[in-house]
Image (cartoon, grey):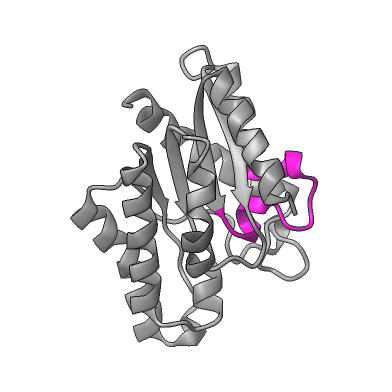
Amino acid sequence: MVSRLALLVLLAAAHLRGETVAFLGDSITAGYGLPVEQAYPALVGAALAADPATAVWRVVNAGVSGDTSAGGLRRIDWVLRAKPTAVVIALGGNDGLRGLPVAQLEANLRGIIAKVRAAGARPLLFGMRVPHNLGPAYAGEFAAVYQRLARELDVPLLPFLLEGVALRPELNQADLIHPDADGQAVIARNVTAWLKPHLAAR
């Protein structure tokens, strides 16, 4: 895991080179079980750099394996110290796997969004879903949090980060939770296509 000091150095260096988008996430964003260059933020960064329209943007992976929305809220302040232009919020999966209260997830995400905006950065939200084996009511309430925040707070929303990857063994590692290199590549393509118009609209 990248130390906080190392992450701040990376953020500062990226900011000096142009616009910066920081990905605040958990093990999916961190690229659990894979080299960091195979995690979707790195792949998105390469795609942005290859396009003259988005080449000014630099990506920083602020994913931490095991992080919950509460963990993201605790560490967003030091991510914001380097003044990223935009912050992608890709959290909640671990909240759901642990069956944490949906109200707590929503409060934490609202807090992160508020801090990002207060720092002058633009929040972007990635939705997550949980298996129905946790109960259809919980799963429905969980998914609704992201839609409600996007609507009420006017935050751009990618509905489901793992679209096309979740529950597909051929795109996941043996635990069937964490994407393999091919799964990360699918996520990166989806994220890049969604992200480019939002970065252009800054």
Residue at x 51% of width, y 85% of height: 133
In the rendered image, which quarter is residue 33 located in? Answer: bottom right
User: Which quarter of the rendered picture does the N terminus lie within?
Assistant: bottom right
The residue sitting at 52% across, 19% down in the picture is 18
Residue lying at the far left of the rendered structure? 152
147 lies left or right of 132: left
Horizontal arrangement in the rendering, residue 90 relative to residue 158 (left or right): right
Percent position (x, y) of residue 27? 65, 59
Front one among 105 and 139: 105
Percent position of residue 42, x then y: 66, 36
Q: Nearer the viewer, residue 152 or 185?
A: 152
Q: Where in the figure is residue 46, as x and y percent of width and height?
A: 64, 27
Which residue lies at the image location 38% right of the left edge and 73% below the top edge? 142
Q: Is residue 161 visible?
A: no
Q: Is residue 31 shown in magenta?
A: yes
Please indicate whether residue 143 sits to the left or right of residue 30 in the image.
left
Question: Which residues make up the magenta segment?
Answer: 25-41
From what the image shows, is residue 16 above or below residue 24? above
**Position above or below: 35 against 72:** above
Q: Which residue is drawn at the image coordinates 49% and 19% (left, top)?
A: 54
Q: Is residue 6 magenta?
A: no
Total marks in image:
0
Q: If the image is split into quadrants, where does the C terminus sit?
A: top left
Viewer can see residue 193: yes
Instruction: Please tell me whether residue 65 is drawn above or below residue 7 in the rendered image.
Output: below
Snapshot quadrant of residue 176: bottom right
